[in-house]
């Protein structure tokens, strides 16, 4: 496999659960740094309830400010028509709807059942089609749920298949709480690939148990070449207790480049983006590669 696409999650998934407030100006600068580092697709915000996720307030300003940057695609989350309208008003070209493979998480995250969420997405997809916007679909809790426990691969396949039938161009499969292991991931991905072509699937793995890179590698062996990742390993969902961040973009880039897969990402610039957002958050990045490279830099100056 030589053609891999990274979807950068830092400004959305990465920041949505942070206690330290990050200003809109700093969020914009973060996106700009990531694009400058070579990340060509960045999820920059969410048009969700400000009561639910105050960290994403101002996503319209973020999107408006970065929208003009050529050679990059910006994604935003929309849970319903209200979110769609706001995203479209801010110039969105790609929106993402988000469902779950478990009833418990669907209820906690978006306050409705899985079936109701699919009904909510229908008008969003219809309007996006009419307006010429692309819609990405997420399925959360594909390898385990904080409320419902084990998730059957078929349950994931059913929801992914519905989003695909609705017209999502790509379905991103979220191990929201990062509990998956490679063989389970393969089993789940094979079940989904019976309903959605592997070429239209993406992997969105959180790294809570340190398995995300191994799971991504397993998925790449199944022909999946779109990988969601967040600079610095930032991220988490307020409705997924105990879950930590997305797999770190630096770690993914290091692995891919080591496999001879060109990512187009400048590691130095990515590290600078990670270090700057970490400085604003007041703690060092958790990613292994950022930690190693920062330590190497410190050794070089002493
Ligand atoms: P609800 O309470 O059922 O909705 O929430 P409602 O229609 O009854 O509206 C309630 C209030 O929210 C009203 O305001 C609406 O106007 C407002 P009030 O009258 O109380 O002042 N509202 C909105 N405001 C702004 N934008 C909107 C919007 N919709 C309604 N689009 C809702 C349902 C989905 C809105 C709510 O539960 C919500 O916003 N949840 C946030 C979910 C979220 O953002 N979760 C994190 C992202 S998902 C994730 O991280 C997983 C992922 O990374 C993949 C993975 O890791 O698995 C993608
Ligand atoms: Mg996530």
Image (tube, rainbow, N blue to C red):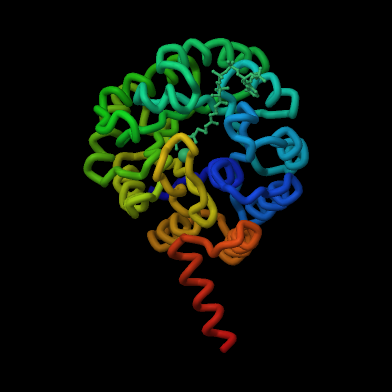
Residue lying at 68% horizontally and 35% vertically, measured from the top left: 57
User: Is residue 19 left or right of 197 when viewed as pictured?
Assistant: right
Q: Closer to the camera, 190 or 60?
A: 60
Q: How many numbered discs?
A: 0
- Judge whether 46 appears above or below 225 on screen: above
User: Is residue 281 something that shows in the picture?
Assistant: yes
State whether residue 35 is above or below residue 169.
below
Residue 297 placement (x, y as % from top left)? 55, 78
Can residue 94 be seen here? The reply is no
Q: Is residue 287 left or right of residue 192?
A: right
Question: Based on the displayed image, in which of its 4 quarters is residue 255 positioned?
Answer: bottom left
* Image position of 2 with respect to 84: above or below: below
Q: x, y (%) of residue 158?
A: 33, 19
Picture quarter with the C terminus: bottom right
Residue at 51% of width from left, 54% of height from top?
263
Q: Nearer the viewer, residue 130 or 236?
A: 236
Residue for point 50% across, 23% down: 110
Extreme bottom residue here?
Answer: 302
Examine the rendered structure and indicate whether residue 111 appears above or below residue 245.
Answer: above
């Amino acid at each position: 496999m030589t053609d891999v696409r990274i979807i950068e999650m830092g400004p959305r998934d990465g920041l949505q659960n942070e206690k330290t407030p990050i200003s809109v100006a700093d969020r914009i600068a973060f996106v700009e740094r990531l694009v400058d580092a070579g990340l060509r697709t960045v999820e920059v915000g969410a048009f969700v309830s400000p009561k639910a996720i105050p960290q994403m307030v101002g996503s319209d300003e973020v999107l408006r400010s970065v929208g003009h940057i050529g050679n990059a695609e910006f994604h935003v989350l929309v849970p319903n028509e209200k979110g769609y309208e706001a995203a479209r008003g801010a110039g969105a070209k790609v929106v993402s709807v988000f469902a779950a493979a478990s009833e418990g998480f669907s209820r906690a995250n978006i306050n409705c059942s899985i079936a109701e969420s699919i009904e909510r997405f229908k008008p969003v997809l219809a309007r996006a089609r009419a307006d010429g916007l692309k819609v990405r679909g997420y399925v959360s809790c594909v390898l385990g749920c904080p409320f419902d426990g084990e998730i059957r691969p078929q349950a994931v396949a059913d929801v992914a298949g519905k989003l695909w039938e609705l017209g999502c161009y790509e379905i991103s499969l979220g191990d929201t709480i990062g509990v998956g292991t490679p063989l389970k991931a393969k089993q789940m991905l094979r079940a989904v690939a019976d309903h959605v072509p592997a070429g239209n699937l993406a992997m969105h793995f959180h790294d809570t148990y340190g398995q995300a890179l191994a799971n991504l590698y397993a998925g790449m062996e199944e022909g999946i070449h779109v990988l969601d990742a967040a600079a610095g390993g930032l991220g988490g969902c307020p409705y997924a207790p105990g879950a930590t961040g997305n797999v770190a973009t630096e770690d993914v880039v290091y692995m891919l480049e080591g496999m001879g897969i060109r990512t187009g990402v400048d590691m130095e610039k990515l590290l600078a983006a990670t270090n700057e957002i970490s400085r604003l958050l007041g703690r060092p990045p958790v990613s292994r590669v950022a930690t190693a490279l920062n330590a190497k830099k410190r050794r070089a100056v002493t």
